[in-house]
Image: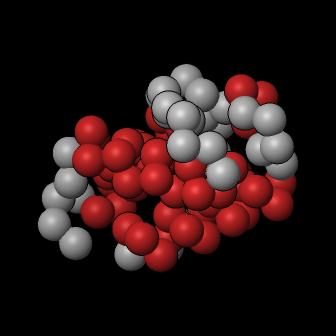
Amino acid sequence: MSLLTESQIYKRLTEIFREAFFRDDLRLSASMTARDIDGWDSLKQIMILVSVEQRFNVKFSTKEMDNLHCVGDLVTLIAAKIG
C-alpha cells in the first residue's frame, strides 16, 4: 500500500467507524475513546480492528492492540505499519 497522509487515514477510519456504528454523522478525533461513542464495547472493538486490518492490509499483534487507548493511537499505528 502506498504511503497515506494522516487525513487519508482518518477518512478511511471514519468510513469504518460509520459502518460499525451505523452513524453517518460520526466524526473522529485523535482523542476519541470508547467512552465517547455509545455501543463501543469489546466486540465492536474487535470488529473495528478486523476491518482496519483488511482495509489497510496490515496485521496487529495483541500487544499493539492492547496499547491502543484512543483513535489517535490507532492512526499512529496504521501510519507506522504502512510507512
Q: Nearer the viewer, residue 25 or 32?
A: 25
Residue at left offset 56%, top offset 49%: 18
Quarter of the image where the N terminus is located: bottom left
The residue sitting at the front extreme is: 24
Residue at left offset 72%, top offset 33%: 37
Colouring scheme, one of rainbow, by chain, secondary structure, one colour: secondary structure
Residue 65 seen: no
The x, y position of residue 70, in whole percent, is 60, 34
Quarter of the image where the C terminus is located: bottom left
The residue sitting at the left extreme is: 2
The x, y position of residue 58, in whole percent, is 42, 72
Residue at left offset 60%, top offset 70%: 50
Residue 82 seen: yes
Residue at left offset 55%, top offset 35%: 26
The x, y position of residue 57, in whole percent, is 38, 75
Residue 23 in the figure: left or right of residue 75:
right
The x, y position of residue 29, in whole percent, is 48, 27
Q: Nearer the viewer, residue 80 or 24?
A: 24
Q: How many marks?
A: 0
